[in-house]
Every structure is written in structure tokens, then in C-alpha cells.
């Protein structure tokens, strides 16, 4: 499968991405394992400032992700990792990814 996004829509400068993921029925643990593998490589990825994943305790098929990148190039590189490709190609997601972009607030 092709990567889920046209990277040209992502900001060139630092940005935070929020994603809500839903696993297909019976595949929540598999999705968690794939996401943990991605989390494991984050320290070695240039340009990834933060990467946090949380699993909903009341709805174990739902996951939230918050990612901060130094820019589009860093995000594009992230999509090229084997761990991301394994996640994307596993077919565990129930529905499309719908990313939201945020800009970090600075102190007044």
C-alpha cells in the first residue's frame, strides 16, 4: 500500500500531528505491537521531536498519537522507515487516518 498522505500537505516548519487510530475488531493488540515498534525507533530518527502513543482504556481498539516533527522532510523520512511500512501494510486499521495539525504555543 502507498503511504497514507501526500506529504506536500504537511508544513515545512516544525509541527505537531495528532492522529486517532482505530484497530479492526480483534486486532487491537496487534496494532499496539506495531505502534510500540515505531516508538522504539524514534530516538534514532532525525527530526522527530516527540512521539507519544496512548491506548484508550475504555475502548481498547482506539489509540491516540501525538507526533512533533522539525518539518516535512523529517515526517517524510519517518514514513520511509520499515517500522512505519510494516504498520501501514499490516491492514489492522479500521478506517482512514485523519490527521490534524497543531502549532505549538510559545510563552507570552
Image (tube, rainbow, N blue to C red):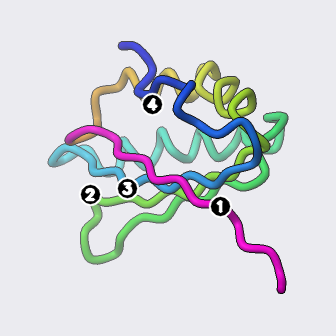
Reading the image, the residue beneath label 4 is 87
Neighbour tally class for label 4: few under 14, some 14-19, many 20 plus, Cα within 10 Å = some
Q: Give coordinates of residue 77: x percent, y percent.
A: 70, 24
Q: Quadrant of the C terminus?
A: bottom right
Earlier residue among tags 3 and 2:
3
The residue that appears at 70% across and 66% down in the rendered structure is 104
Horizontally, residue 41 falls left or right of residue 10, namely right
Q: Quadrant of the N terminus?
A: top left
Question: How far is mark 1 from mark 2, CA to CA?
Answer: 28 Å
Tag nearer the camera, 4 or 3: 3
Farthest residue in the top direction? 1
Element class at badge 3: strand
Reading the image, the residue beneath label 1 is 103
Question: How far is mark 4 from mark 3, CA to CA?
Answer: 15 Å
Tag nearer the camera, 4 or 1: 1
Reading the image, the residue beneath label 2 is 61
Reading the image, the residue beneath label 3 is 20
Horizontally, residue 11 falls left or right of residue 34, namely right
Q: Main secondary structure of the magenta part?
A: loop
Above or below — where is 52 with respect to 76?
A: below
Question: How far is mark 4 from mark 1, CA to CA?
Answer: 26 Å
Residue range in magenta is: 95-108
Earlier residue among tags 1 and 2:
2
Neighbour tally class for label 2: few under 14, some 14-19, many 20 plus, Cα within 10 Å = many
Horizontally, residue 69 falls left or right of residue 107, namely left
Amino acid at each position: 500500500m502507498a503511504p497514507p498522505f501526500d506529504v506536500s500537505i504537511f508544513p515545512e516548519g516544525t509541527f505537531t500531528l495528532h492522529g486517532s487510530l482505530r484497530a479492526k475488531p480483534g486486532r487491537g493488540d496487534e496494532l499496539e505491537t506495531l505502534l510500540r515498534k515505531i516508538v522504539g525507533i524514534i530516538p534514532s530518527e532525525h527530526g522527530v521531536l516527540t512521539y507519544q502513543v496512548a491506548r484508550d482504556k475504555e475502548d481498547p481498539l482506539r489509540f491516540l498519537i501525538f507526533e512533533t516533527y522539525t518539518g516535512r522532510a523529517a515526517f517524510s523520512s519517518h514514513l520511509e522507515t520499515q517500522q512505519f511500512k510494516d504498520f501501514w501494510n499490516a491492514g489492522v486499521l479500521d478506517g482512514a487516518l485523519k490527521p490534524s495539525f497543531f502549532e505549538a504555543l510559545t510563552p507570552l
